[in-house]
Image: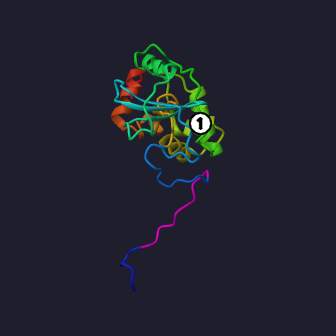
Amino acid sequence: MGGRRGHRARRVRPAEDQGDHRRAPRGTRGSEGPSPVVTHWWRQPTPVGELTVVAGPNGLCEIELHGPTPPDGDPERDESIAAELDEYFARRRRRFTVPVDLGSVTAVFRRRVLETLYRDVPYGETVSYGELAVMAGRPGAARAVGSTMATNPVPVVVPCHRVLAAGGRIGGYGGGLRMKRALLALERVDV
């Protein structure tokens, strides 16, 4: 007798890759693995807003699109990463060559999706969530790809802005749709 009239319990399905999907602490972009060791961090101004960039001994490990509270310690830039980001935003770089550390992404499928996106979707081109699922070896896993894009620890460099919804619709983006459109416009993609 304690329930509301017409209220039914909703059944929740487990996540497709069985990863931990609880809200992550600020600054981790939903990563499911251990926090990376930070050797460099800095705030980098760009045409789409200020980014907080974090690097460790194995390379670039995090880009925050809205500049939350950075890691402890004094900021120190990794000049090679900062230079490549500057070149990208000046339209002088189409492919990043700095090492990318995806060590915080422990779910096998999520990591495969990010690696496939980084390697196989070039500057100025887009794919749908469903197409990326097929490219990563899991046809029908478009929602899991969308979830992976939402927790991408290194957006811009691992270009989740190039992933669109079915039918060429813009879809979502962790930095907001204005930022996604700006990144696509930078690459001269019409959406």
The residue where tag 1 is placed is 102
Residue at x 51% of width, y 19% of height: 80
In this view, the residue farthest toward the top is 92
Q: Nearer the viewer, residue 159 or 32?
A: 32
| Residue 55 among those drawn in magenta | no
Look at the image and tell me whether residue 139 can be seen.
Answer: no
- Across and down, in percent, residue 175 comes to 39, 37
Residue type, label 1: Leu
Image: 144 above or below 40:
below
- Across and down, in percent, residue 164 comes to 46, 35
Label 1: few (<14), some (14–19) or many (≥20) C-alpha neighbours in 10 Å? many
Image: 2 above or below 183:
below
Q: Mark 1 falls on what kind of element? A: loop
The magenta stretch is 8-17
- Across and down, in percent, residue 39 comes to 53, 32
Residue at x 38% of width, y 23% of height: 185
- Across and down, in percent, residue 8 comes to 43, 73
| Figure quadrant of the C terminus | top left
| Figure quadrant of the N terminus | bottom left
The secondary structure that dominates the magenta segment is loop
Image: 97 above or below 38:
above
Residue at x 43% of width, y 47% of height: 26
How is the structure coloured here? rainbow
User: Could you tell whether 190 is left or right of 55 in the image?
Assistant: left
Look at the image and tell me whether residue 43 can be seen.
Answer: yes
In this view, the residue farthest toward the front is 73
Q: Nearer the viewer, residue 189 or 72?
A: 72
